């Protein structure tokens, strides 16, 4: 019995480090980056996925449960993007603070208007999300809106550092607006350009840069490309000048490559999340995408 | 009465314009009318423009200060539980063996139709029971789930539990009927299995359902450590094999378990566990063969204790499981049973008239399996099962009950295709040598379809 008690005490000692600020569990790197930018040194940010992972399909790994157990704030993308794993992780963690609906649970997609809200819900249409397309991170203007709401949430959860959070955010927001104007100007020649996508991960990017989508390699969202569908798409592309084929890096290369060779349109691996959860990571992400697209002249 | 409220001037204007365009109006009056119409039109256009401006403002991304609320499902429909229906069935080719069992292991004697058992099952075409699953948050403190298994003329409650939501401090309490947290595969429903049937270990341990379920309470605690460490304790009725329903106020069975898990790099993750199950049986009925090959019936009364160690290792290149991934899984058990054994048989059998004895058994077994997804949608798997009937001391009944010296074993290979996470078609072949003297080459062609909401699966 004594041994059990001392083991318990040891565990509790491990449990309460000298940390005073917020522990943030972010599902995607872009939201981790925002939490880090807002929180600065006052927060400890854990990011559950990385840019090379398909955020739809992540295992509810034990390590994620351990992290969710310790979190003060979960920053999720929402719009059902993480429906395959986050609910299990949160329920298994036994953390009262981060139950959906409580202040410790924040959803980015709930802060901005969504695109591609399906008119009907039918699994025959593939992996449709009832709330709309969840890949909002690819629009830096929406990211700004999300960050502003997140600042409010973090300030409410940790009033002692509220002024720091607001100050950090103000600084970032003005830098960000300048950066977005820069990218928008750089991407001006892309306005009206046509793209083909592998997965419907880019509607927010398209809206921001004024791109038009001709079609998708996946016959339905989340359904692997078939040769018949690809052939149809190729025929469709023959009549229209297409600037590029956009592919999330986690999808298989082969279908895009085939279509690129068949149509002469370059295929670009366009990340759906920043490589690093930091301000620089966010900047490199958008700057890289704009540069990729501008360079991919037809 | 009614007409008194109609404004008379516009009415007169309209009438005069429509009915007497040329007769009633002089030039001066016409000009006046035109001016009035223009004024009306200007006013409406102004208002329209104002409305359009407002609409456009609302369509633009909302400013953060007035963040748009999460789009809620419409009306009361949104409050309904998540429902999923799982359809499962197969074609199965196997030997015609009477009283299929695992040599040397006691099982609950099944009388009559056992077509819906997960372990045995019928030959040829058949449908498994259809699982109907409801789940939802009950309120801000509780969440619940019910899983009904339906087959012709029967509905079985596989699970029906509530669970606390955010008790905090890593604690969760579950109450009702639930699949125990012991082992690794125990909590998985058949539709989540990586093979069409359960491992021999789970069939030997828990009989028909190849999973231990209990009516009672479960307490889980996730330790606040950087590595995943979870403890669980359960108490309950203990009515299921290896225990029996004993009609007492006390606790029929209890379980304890601990899980440890983590990641190695970005591509590997693992979980390991140890579990203990204690159950009591009263007149637990089984069939055995006596030394002369006749069937005898036994009733076991005593305690059954089971230890399980389990381990799972998953590999997904760069943590991206959608293209390729590998899952290795193995479990090992030891079961000790101690108590009394009452052996009965017909005239001429060794237990004619009934023979009581002490009994003490110590049995063990394991399985190991690997499932590899080599490209999206396609997986192949290999499983090996082996059991050791171990020590069986039936006291004076040693002279009556045959103790087959056979290590049941089986090798299984499978390939499955899952066009989406909602459908799966599987081909499986097994060389089953779980019965002494029988080699049964089994072929399965199975489908698993899930309709409706589909909850996330745990690790």
Image (cartoon, coloured by chain):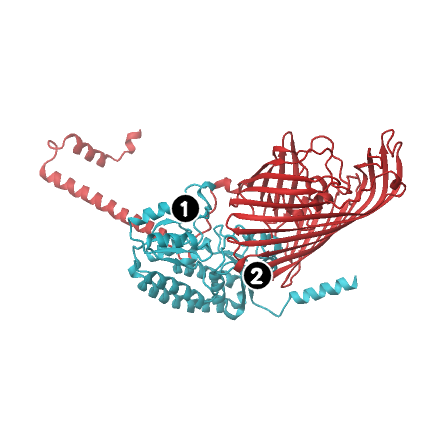
Chain colours: A cyan, B red
Q: Residue at x 87, y 30 (%)?
A: B348
Q: Dot 1 lies on which element?
A: helix
Residue at the image point whose x is 52% and y is 50% from the top: A83
Q: Residues within 10 Å of mark 1 (few under 14, many from 20)?
A: few
**What is the CA distance from the residue labelled 1 to the residue labelled 2?**
47 Å
In this view of the protein, which residue sits in the foreground, B29 or B384? B384
Q: Can you give x and y, in whole percent of width and height, for residue B202 in the image?
A: 70, 45
Query: Which residue is identified by label 1?
Result: A227
Q: Is residue B455 left or right of residue B157?
A: left
- Asked if residue A167 shows in the view, the reply is yes
Eye-nearest disc, 1 or 2: 1
**Sequence-first tag of 1 and 2:** 2
> Dot 2 falls on which chain?
A
Toward the viewer: A16 or A60?
A60
Toward the left, the furthest residue is: B27
- Say above or below: A98 vs B38: below
Q: Is residue A83 left or right of residue B345?
A: left
Residue B320 in the image, given as x and y percentages of width and height: 52, 56
Locate residue B222: give its quadrant.
bottom right
Horizontal relation, residue B360 to residue A72: left or right: right
Seen in the picture, residue B300 relative to A87 is either above or below; the reply is above
Say if residue B250 shows up in the picture. Answer: no
* Chain identifier of the residue bearing label 1 in the image: A
Under tag 2, what secondary structure?
loop
Q: Position of residue B20 (x, y in %)?
A: 14, 30
Quadrant housing residue A21: bottom right
Give the residue pinned by disc 2.
A72
Image quarter of the N terminus of chain B: top left
- Label 2: few (<14), some (14–19) or many (≥20) C-alpha neighbours in 10 Å: many
Give coordinates of residue A161: x percent, y percent. Answer: 52, 68
């Amino acid at each position: 019995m004594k041994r059990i008690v001392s083991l318990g005490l040891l565990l509790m000692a491990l449990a309460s480090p000298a940390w005073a600020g917020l522990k943030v569990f972010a599902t995607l790197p872009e939201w981790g980056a925002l939490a880090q930018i807002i929180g600065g040194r006052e927060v400890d940010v854990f990011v559950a996925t990385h840019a090379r992972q398909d955020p739809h399909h992540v295992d509810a790994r034990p390590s994620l449960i351990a992290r969710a157990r310790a979190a003060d704030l979960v920053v999720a993308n929402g719009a059902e993007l993480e429906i395959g794993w986050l609910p299990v992780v949160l329920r298994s963690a036994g953390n009262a603070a981060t139950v959906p609906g409580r202040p410790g649970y924040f959803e980015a997609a709930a802060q901005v208007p969504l695109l591609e809200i399906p008119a009907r819900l039918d699994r025959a249409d593939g992996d449709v999300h009832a709330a709309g397309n969840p890949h909002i991170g690819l629009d830096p203007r929406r990211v700004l809106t999300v960050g502003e709401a997140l600042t409010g949430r973090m300030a409410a959860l940790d009033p002692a550092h509220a002024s720091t959070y607001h100050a950090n955010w103000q600084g970032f927001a003005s830098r960000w607006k300048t950066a977005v104007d820069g990218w928008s100007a750089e991407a001006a020649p892309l306005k009206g350009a046509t793209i083909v996508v592998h997965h419907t991960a880019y509607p927010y990017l398209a809206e921001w840069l004024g791109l038009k989508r001709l079609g998708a390699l996946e016959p339905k969202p989340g359904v692997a490309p078939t040769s018949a569908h690809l052939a149809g798409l190729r025929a469709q592309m023959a009549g229209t000048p297409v600037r590029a084929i956009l592919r999330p890096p986690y999808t298989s290369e082969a279908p895009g490559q085939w279509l690129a060779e068949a149509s002469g349109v370059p295929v670009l691996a366009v990340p759906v999340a920043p490589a690093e959860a930091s301000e620089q990571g966010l900047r490199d992400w958008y700057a890289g995408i704009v540069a990729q697209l501008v360079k991919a002249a037809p | 009465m009614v007409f008194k409220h109609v404004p008379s001037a516009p009415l007169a204007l309209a009438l005069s314009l429509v009915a007497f365009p040329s007769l009633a109006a002089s030039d001066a009056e016409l000009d006046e009318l035109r001016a009035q119409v223009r004024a009306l039109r200007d006013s409406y256009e102004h208002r329209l423009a104002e409305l359009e401006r407002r609409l456009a403002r609302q369509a633009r991304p909302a400013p953060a200060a007035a963040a748009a609320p999460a789009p809620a499902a419409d009306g009361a429909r949104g409050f309904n539980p998540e429902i999923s229906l799982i359809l499962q069935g197969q074609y199965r080719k196997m030997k015609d063996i009477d009283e299929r069992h695992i040599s040397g292991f006691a099982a609950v004697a099944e009388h009559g139709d056992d077509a819906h058992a997960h372990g045995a099952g019928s030959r040829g075409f058949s449908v498994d029971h259809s699982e109907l699953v409801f789940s939802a948050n009950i309120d801000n403190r509780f969440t619940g789930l019910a899983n009904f298994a339906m087959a012709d003329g029967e509905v079985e409650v596989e699970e029906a539990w509530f669970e606390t939501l955010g008790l905090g401090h890593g604690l969760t309490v579950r109450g009702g009927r639930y699949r125990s947290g012991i082992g690794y595969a125990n909590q998985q429903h058949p539709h989540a299995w990586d093979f069409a049937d359960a491992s021999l270990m789970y069939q030997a341990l828990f009989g028909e359902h190849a999973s231990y379920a209990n009516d009672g309470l479960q307490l889980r605690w996730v330790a606040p450590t950087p590595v995943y460490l979870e403890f669980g304790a359960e108490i309950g009725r203990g009515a299921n094999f290896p225990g029996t329903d004993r009609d007492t106020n006390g606790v029929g069975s209890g379980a304890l378990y601990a899980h440890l898990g983590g990641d190695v790099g970005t591509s590997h993750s693992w979980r390991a566990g140890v579990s203990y199950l204690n159950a009591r049986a009263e007149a637990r009925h089984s069939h055995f063969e006596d030394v002369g090959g006749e069937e005898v019936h036994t009733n076991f009364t005593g305690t059954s204790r089971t230890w399980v160690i389990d381990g799972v290792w998953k590999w997904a290149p760069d943590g991206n499981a959608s293209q390729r991934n590998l899952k290795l899984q193995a479990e090992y058990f030891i079961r000790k049973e101690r108590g009394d054994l009452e052996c009965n048989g017909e005239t001429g059998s060794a237990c004619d008239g009934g023979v009581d004895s002490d009994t003490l058994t110590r049995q063990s077994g394991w399985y190991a399996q690997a499932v590899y997804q080599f490209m999206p949608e396609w997986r192949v798997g290999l499983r090996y099962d082996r059991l050791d009937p171990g020590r069986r001391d039936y006291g004076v009944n040693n002279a009556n009950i045959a103790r087959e010296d056979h290590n049941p074993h089986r090798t299984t290979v499978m390939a499955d295709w899952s066009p989406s996470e909602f459908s799966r078609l599987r081909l499986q072949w097994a060389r089953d040598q779980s019965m002494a003297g029988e080699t049964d080459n089994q072929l399965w062609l199975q489908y698993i379809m899930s309709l409706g909401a589909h909850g996330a699966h745990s690790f």
